[in-house]
Image: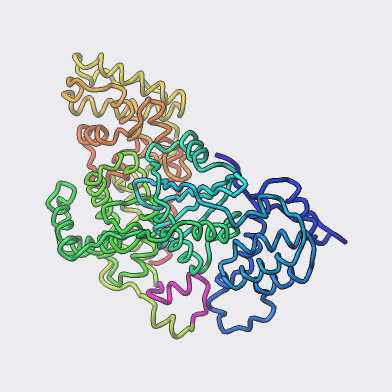
């Protein structure tokens, strides 16, 4: 994609101090309108009173320069550069009075400004687009702006729904909006991204709401280009017609949420999760999904999982540990159900389930520790002042019978990964040997098909992974083929089968985690697949006799298919949790 537009840095004047007029002279000389517009936008954003800390609202405003005062300063300095600044402020300023004063000051001057700047009042917005993704974390609004001189540039504004449908980032580029869309299409590696033209009134309504909400958010979202180009975005919104409806959240009535819960528990995904705790927890998950993020409790993303487990449940729900500890298992099942209902691509489902695995250990620790709840937790999160007595009153102290401490809980999970407590205690970190497939366990009539799958698995491991992964894949393939030979007597893709075996081994070894070193889509791309192989993988788990209650975690129940790096991590975790238990005894 094109490099983001950025306000240029000051060149430096006398004694190395910034020389504003020299900067403006240099920007005008480039002939690129966006340089000056972004610079003025950045100046205006820096003076925006909405950026101030709300916890200091009672403090004196002494020392805070306002845009009105800055405009008056430019009015008093009769130079071509200040005329250029006033021309920009006369359009970009949100305050009607400031705009009028800047325009009135220009009428008393005789400076010759560049044509594009002199005719800035004739700027129009030609087209707008939206760029969306299926999980609903956020979308981009792309706005094409045309100056009266014919020059065009575009704004790309990212609206984050998980944070409250607020603008989280934005930038400008010297491209037409059609060219920007074409470039984003060409360079986007995400097959789920969709582009659609957006009615200008609708684009304005969305920008007005999301920009305004973001400006009121504290702490503010800040990037290299935002909120520096926020005045530019607000100007663009004013150039579009009114009348759009803006973002509309779906309405979920009590009967709607109850019907969703009933449908989930009636499905195979909800089997075994029907006791009172799970029903109560599902109400909470649906509450979160309906009232937060995009407002759709059937769309779950890794970001939504992080917010739910790391913040929302610990802060919102006052319940005993045994109740809260069940949330990750329920969430895994509910995500799989919801994504099937919404037709979400399997690869995105796998990424979302992997997020549950990634955040569960920390979640289990948090719910077992004293923590702030309610408004106090929000104030503490943003660094606001918190009275000690208020904090004490708002503190959640874990209650209820907790049969396992966090360390004990995690030791139980580690034991499940490797086949029991005895296996966990004797676990070795020796590398897996380079060994062949156990052909004697494979029925003769399916050996040709198994050979094709084996070759594909070996080629993947040789190219992308290593010998240990190759051995682990061979061992899993042996277990699957020996466990249910009928799977290999059906007409099905050997490529998908190889991808499923490799994906299962990778997931069990946390290959696709944040620090695992590989993306699922990259593995699938090796096999020439645009989607994952999770459905075939689930069948293979059953054939190998491996329970899939924690399907995203992929607990193979044996160390035989875990590479040395994964076993070293398990050993380190085992020793740490045992030390914690000993210390608390």
x%, y% of residue 388? 48, 83
Nearest the viewer among 448 and 386 is: 386
Residue at 37% in and 43% down: 426
Find out whether residue 381 is within the magenta segment. Answer: yes
Magenta span: 371-386
x%, y% of residue 2? 58, 40
Residue at 38% in and 67% down: 585
Residue 322 image-quadrant placement:
bottom left
Q: Is residue 432 left or right of residue 269?
A: right
- 357 relative to 501, above or below: below
Labels in figure, total:
0
The single residue placed furthest to the left in the displayed view is: 266
Residue at 39% in and 72% down: 370
- 37 relative to 127, above or below: below
Nearest the viewer among 67 and 50 is: 67
Residue 553 image-quadrant placement:
top left
x%, y% of residue 289? 29, 59
Q: Is residue 208 left or right of residue 146?
A: left
Coloration of the structure image:
rainbow
Residue 3 image-quadrant placement:
top right
Q: Is residue 242 visible?
A: yes
Nearest the viewer among 493 and 480 is: 493
x%, y% of residue 528? 37, 25
The quadrant in which the N terminus is found is: top right
The single residue placed furthest to the right in the displayed view is: 15
Residue at 46% in and 45% down: 514
Q: Is residue 199 left or right of residue 537?
A: right
Q: Is residue 407 visible?
A: no
């Amino acid at each position: 994609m094109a490099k983001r537009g950025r306000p240029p840095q000051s060149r430096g004047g006398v004694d190395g101090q910034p020389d504003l007029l020299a900067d403006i002279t240099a920007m005008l000389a480039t002939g690129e309108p966006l340089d000056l517009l972004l610079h003025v936008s950045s100046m205006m954003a820096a003076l925006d009173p909405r950026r101030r800390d709300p916890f200091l609202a009672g403090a004196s405003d002494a020392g805070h320069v306002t845009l009105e005062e800055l405009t008056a300063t430019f009015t008093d300095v009769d130079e071509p550069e200040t005329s250029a600044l006033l021309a920009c402020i006369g359009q970009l300023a949100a305050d009607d009075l400031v705009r009028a004063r800047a325009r009135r000051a220009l009428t008393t001057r005789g400076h010759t400004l560049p044509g594009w700047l002199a005719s800035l009042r004739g700027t129009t917005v030609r087209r707008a687009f939206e760029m969306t993704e299926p999980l609903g974390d956020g979308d981009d609004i792309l706005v094409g702006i045309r100056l009266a001189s014919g020059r065009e540039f575009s704004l790309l504004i990212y609206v984050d729904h998980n944070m409250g449908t607020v603008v989280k980032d934005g930038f400008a580029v010297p491209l037409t909006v059609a060219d920007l869309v074409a470039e984003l299409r060409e360079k986007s590696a995400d097959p789920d991204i969709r582009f659609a033209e957006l009615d200008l009134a609708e684009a304005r309504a969305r920008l007005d709401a999301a920009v305004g909400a973001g400006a009121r958010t504290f702490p503010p979202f800040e990037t290299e280009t935002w909120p520096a180009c926020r005045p530019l975005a607000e100007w663009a919104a004013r150039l579009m017609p009114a009348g759009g409806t803006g973002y509309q959240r779906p309405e979920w009535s009590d009967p709607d949420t109850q019907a969703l819960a009933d449908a989930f528990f009636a499905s195979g995904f909800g089997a075994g999760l029907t006791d009172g705790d799970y029903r109560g927890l599902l109400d909470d998950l649906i509450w979160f999904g309906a009232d937060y993020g995009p407002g759709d409790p059937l769309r779950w993303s890794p970001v939504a999982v992080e917010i739910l487990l790391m913040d929302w449940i610990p802060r919102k729900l006052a319940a005993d540990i045994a109740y809260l500890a069940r949330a990750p298992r329920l969430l895994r099942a509910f995500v799989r159900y919801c994504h099937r209902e919404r037709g979400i691509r399997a690869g995105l489902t796998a990424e979302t389930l992997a997020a549950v695995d990634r955040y569960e250990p920390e979640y289990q620790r948090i719910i077992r520790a004293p923590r702030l709840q309610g408004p106090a937790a929000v104030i503490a999160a943003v660094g606001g002042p918190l009275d000690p007595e208020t904090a004490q009153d708002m503190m959640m102290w874990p209650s209820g019978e907790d049969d396992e401490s966090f360390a004990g809980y995690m030791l139980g999970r580690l034991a499940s990964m490797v086949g029991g407590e005895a296996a966990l205690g004797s676990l070795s970190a020796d590398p897996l040997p380079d060994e062949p497939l156990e052909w004697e366990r494979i029925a003769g009539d399916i050996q040709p098909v198994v050979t094709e799958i084996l070759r594909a698995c070996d080629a993947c491991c040789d190219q992308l992974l290593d010998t240990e992964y190759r051995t682990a894949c061979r061992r899993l393939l042996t277990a699957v083929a020996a466990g249910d030979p009928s799977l290999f007597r059906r007409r099905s893709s050997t490529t998908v089968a190889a991808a499923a075996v490799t994906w299962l081994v990778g997931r069990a070894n946390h290959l696709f985690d944040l620090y695992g070193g590989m993306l699922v889509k990259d593995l699938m791309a090796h096999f020439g697949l645009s989607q994952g192989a999770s459905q075939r993988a689930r069948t293979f788990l059953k054939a190998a006799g491996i329970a899939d209650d924690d399907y995203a975690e992929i607990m193979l129940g044996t160390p035989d298919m875990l590479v040395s790096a994964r076993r070293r991590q398990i050993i380190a975790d085992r020793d740490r949790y045992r030390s914690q238990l000993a210390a608390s005894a």
